Image: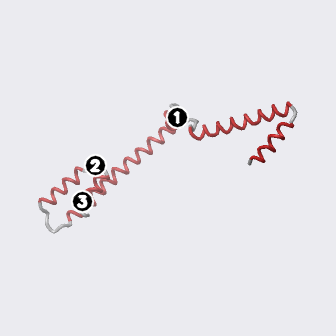
Amino acid sequence: MKNLFYKVWNWYKALPWWGKILGAVVLVLVVLLGILYLISKFFPGGRDKDLRDIDDLTGDHHDELIDHLNDDAEKLKKDIVEKKKEIAKKINQAGKIDAETLKRREKIEKATTMEELDKLQEELDL
């Protein structure tokens, strides 16, 4: 490695004065481009149009986004209702309905999220 460095250094010293200046400028530009590249990796630039551009939030893109979110919310509501029906059906399959079954039904009706329903299903071994 030292040998290569000395070869390059001797070649650089043999250049005319304008070649030395040009070489130094090119070296500085390469180093600056390297630094800018590293900075761009750590601090991504640009604008996130979905979150930062207020003009896009009033256009067609906003309407599509809201429609998509509403569809997802409706699907989640339907999934929760279906899960409640599924758990209630399994409880009702018991031969007799006792106080414990009624308590289980109340727990099912009170659940509002899929996580709660999954937990109930696990608790009740259904």
Label ID, residue 120: none
Horizontal arrangement in the rendering, residue 54 relative to residue 92 (left or right): right
User: Residue type at mark 2?
Assistant: Thr
How far apart are the two marked residues, 1 and 3, measured between alpha carbons? 47 Å
Of badges 2 and 1, nearer the viewer stands 2
Q: Upstream in the sequence, badge 2 or badge 1? A: 1
Sort mark 2 into few (<14), some (14-19) or many (20+) by Cα contacts within 10 Å.
few
State the image quarter where residue 67 is shown.
top left
Q: Which residue is mark 3?
A: 123
How far apart are the two marked residues, 2 and 1, measured between alpha carbons? 34 Å
User: Percent position (x, y) of residue 54?
Assistant: 50, 31
Sort mark 3 into few (<14), some (14-19) or many (20+) by Cα contacts within 10 Å.
few
User: Percent position (x, y) of residue 53?
Assistant: 52, 33
Relative to 76, say whether 95 is above or below: below
How far apart are the two marked residues, 2 and 3, measured between alpha carbons? 16 Å
User: Percent position (x, y) of residue 115?
Assistant: 31, 52
User: Percent position (x, y) of residue 97?
Assistant: 14, 63
User: Residue type at mark 1?
Assistant: Asp
Q: Residue at x 79, y 43 (%)?
A: 6
Q: Upstream in the sequence, badge 2 or badge 3? A: 2
Q: Residue at x 78, y 47 (%)?
A: 4
Horizontal arrangement in the rendering, residue 47 relative to residue 116 (left or right): right
Q: Which residue is mark 2?
A: 112
Q: Which residue is mark 1?
A: 56
User: Residue type at mark 3?
Assistant: Glu
Q: Residue at x 30, y 54 (%)?
A: 81
